Amino acid sequence: GNYSGQLRPQIHFSPPKEFMNDPNGMFLDAEGTYHLYYQYNPTNLVGGNQTWGHATSKDLFHWINQPIAIHPPNNNSQVYSGSAVIDVNNTSGFFPNQTNGVVAIYTLNSPNLEVQEIAYSLDGGYTFERYEGNPVLDVHSSQFRDPKVLWHAETGKWVMVVAYATDLVIGIYTSPNLKDWTHASNFSRANALGSQYECPNLVALPLINVDGSSSTAYILQISINPGAPLGGSITTYFPGSFNGTHFTPSDSEIRFTDFAKDNYAGQFFYGLPADEKQLSIIWANNWQYAESVPTDEEGWRSAMSLAKANSLRDTGDAGYQLVQELVDLRPVYNSTLANVSTSDNLSTSVDYSSVTSGAVYLDVNITNIVTPAGSLNLTFTSTSGGSLSAGYLLSSGEFWINRGNIHEFANFSNDGFTETFNTTYCVEGSVWRLQAVVDRTLLEVFIDRGKSTATMVFYPADKLDGLTVSAEGLGQDVGVSATVWGLKSAWA
Ligand code: FRU
């Protein structure tokens, strides 16, 4: 792959060439290597001919592209989304002499049928053999896909969540050996959003309770497409409990993982320690325009989000909230471009045209807040005058981001390419923090260490290379600091 194009993210994963969508089969192996598979059409810049592309990384920034891991058995079928597990105890019988056997569980899509299949890897996830007893799950449906499997230690069973896509139902199945699956329950909502459910994930996350103590709770994450409130696709989640066969949501609220619209089909890694924050990676695009974004000029389409570290917190009134923290960026730190701190009002401009990656990280901390007041504004600029901006009003908690003033690359336009996104996130206590990563064509925003997050793609005609941060009227004793780092390319 050629990663030098001006639209290519430099610290995010994107495919060597052609079209990528959902992350698949992600796991961490015993040697500390992260495996990312992904929906990959190696022959075209739109979806089709789906296979599992593969990349590996030690730090979640520097990825090594590997050969395609799973191909369909014939020209009439495609390998759709799914997951992977490490079968340490050889429950499947595929691995009599090893503890690092990997089983991939995926959907085989053919014109009138979607079934769940498995494939096993004797070499730690690089090459796979299809199981001769496939399919392992067939309900005679053309809309039955995206199995995500976890190990449920309390019952000693594998558990699969899988979407009956157009029924807006998630099926839960259990198995002792990954080959024989028994239906356990269904999850559905009377007020379901969207016209298809896709890519469900069920995962146990660390939970911080109101009193500060910690325990564990589950979330069932469901991607919906089309029919997201902002158009196209988005990810929703339900916090709750899981007893090995049934998922019980804690309330009837539909929550979103992101307040922009480039967040779909995210998946949690298999194989992380059970009591730790769980890592996820998300497809940073939207089916409304993913197949028409202008990066085709450079021979590729779509990137993944950075990895995020996920946990839950109990907010009291608003119930359990997903917290998605930015992972440690130190593996890609290059230089500190600005580091200012003052009180009440702040204004600083950074010219980062010398940062060859075009990727920067901004961290703003406001401290000593008594009565929230004043505003914060950020503007990333390019020489052609296009800009990307964001702002926050402390009194109302209104936060916004805007991609509408970018001078678009190659006159890209799409009716679904919503320009501004808003959320309300009120200051909690006396401090407030904003972290933002800009990486050529991707913006990721984390408010208060990931309690509210946004992922947004944009396609500038000229590269962004200036940043202005200003704060006004915060109050005399309120402290404000801004630090900007230039990041180094993980692909150079
Ligand atoms: C979600 C999805 C999945 C399917 C895959 C096909 O983006 O539609 O439901 O398995 O993409 O590439």
Image (cartoon, rainbow, N blue to C red):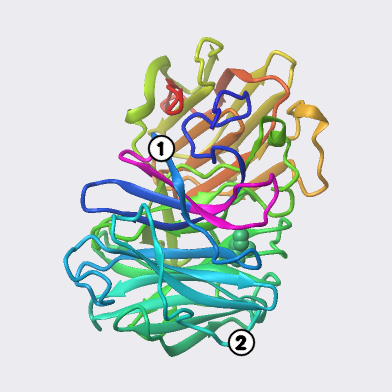
Residue 176 % position (x, y):
29, 83
Residue nearest the viewer, comparing 164 with 263: 164
Q: Residue at x 56, y 26 (%)?
A: 473
Mark 1, other Cα within 10 Å: few <14 / some 14–19 / many ≥20: many
Choose top left, top right, bottom left or bottom right for residue 145. Answer: bottom right
Residue 31 % position (x, y):
21, 48
| Figure quarter occupied by ligand 1 | bottom right
Residue 394 % position (x, y):
55, 39
Residue 264 % position (x, y):
58, 56
Mark 1 in CB contact with mark 2 (< 8 angstroms): no
- What label does residue 63 carry, if any? 1
Q: Residue at x 72, y 31 (%)?
A: 297
Left or right? Give the position of 342 relative to 283: left
Question: Mark 1 vs ligand 1: CB under 8 Å?
Answer: no
Q: Is residue 315 magenta?
A: no
> Element at badge 1?
strand
For the record, the magenta segment spans 38-61
Q: Is residue 51 magenta?
A: yes
Choose top left, top right, bottom left or bottom right for residue 79. Answer: bottom right
